[in-house]
Image (spheres, rainbow, N blue to C red):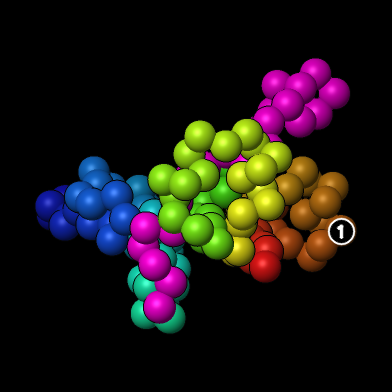
Amino acid sequence: MSEQALLTCPIRGALTVSRLAKDGLTVSEESHRIDCIKFLLNRDYDKRSIEVETIVIKNLGESGRNKLRADIIVYKCLVVEVSGMTMEKRLQKIALARISHRPPASLAGWAGCHHHRSFAAMIA
């Protein structure tokens, strides 16, 4: 197997993830995430207002052990300004978020998705 180049994120810097997924054929989720970040930066969103892989809601579910994580969040202000805020106040500062997850099999079937694929939502 040939050595694959590792990715560089415009927000986080050099990563230890390659462009291709483990199968060596499909583009990795991280590569898609970086493409999305580059898209946002090309539309003049300030990189200092973008946060990657962030928990936006805690204590989900019956037992409260689950969390909702956003792949990408664009705040209405700089990330350093929201870093000390409570979760509720941070949510009010979100301008845009990309959240992806694997739906339960019943939801995937209902939505017409394939069970092995995740789906994403952009919240504005």
> In the image shown, does 66 or 19 lie closer to the viewer?
66
Is residue 98 positioned above or below 82 on the image?
A: below
> In the image shown, does 99 or 109 lie closer to the viewer?
99
Q: Residue 89, position in %: x, y?
A: 66, 43
The three-letter amino acid code for the residue at tag 1 is: Trp
Residue 114 position by quadrant: bottom right
Would residue 21 be seen by someone viewing this image from the given angle?
Answer: yes
Q: Residue at x 86, y 58 (%)?
A: 110
Stretch of the chain drawn in magenta? 44-68
Is residue 38 positioned above or below 27 on the image?
A: below
Tag 1 residue: 110
Would residue 116 be seen by someone viewing this image from the given angle?
Answer: no
Q: Residues within 10 Å of mark 1 (few under 14, many from 20)?
A: few
Question: Could you tell me which secondary element the residue under label 1 belongs to?
Answer: helix
Quarter containing the C terminus? bottom right
Is residue 92 positioned above or below 65 on the image?
A: below
Extreme residue in the bottom direction = 43
> In the image shown, does 62 or 21 lie closer to the viewer?
62
Taking the image as shown, residue 30 lies to the left or right of residue 66, namely left
Q: Residue 13, position in %: x, y?
A: 23, 52
Is residue 122 positioned above or below 82 on the image?
A: below
Q: Residue at x 77, y 43 (%)?
A: 104
Q: Residue 117, position in %: x, y?
A: 61, 56
Q: Residue at x 35, y 48 (%)?
A: 22
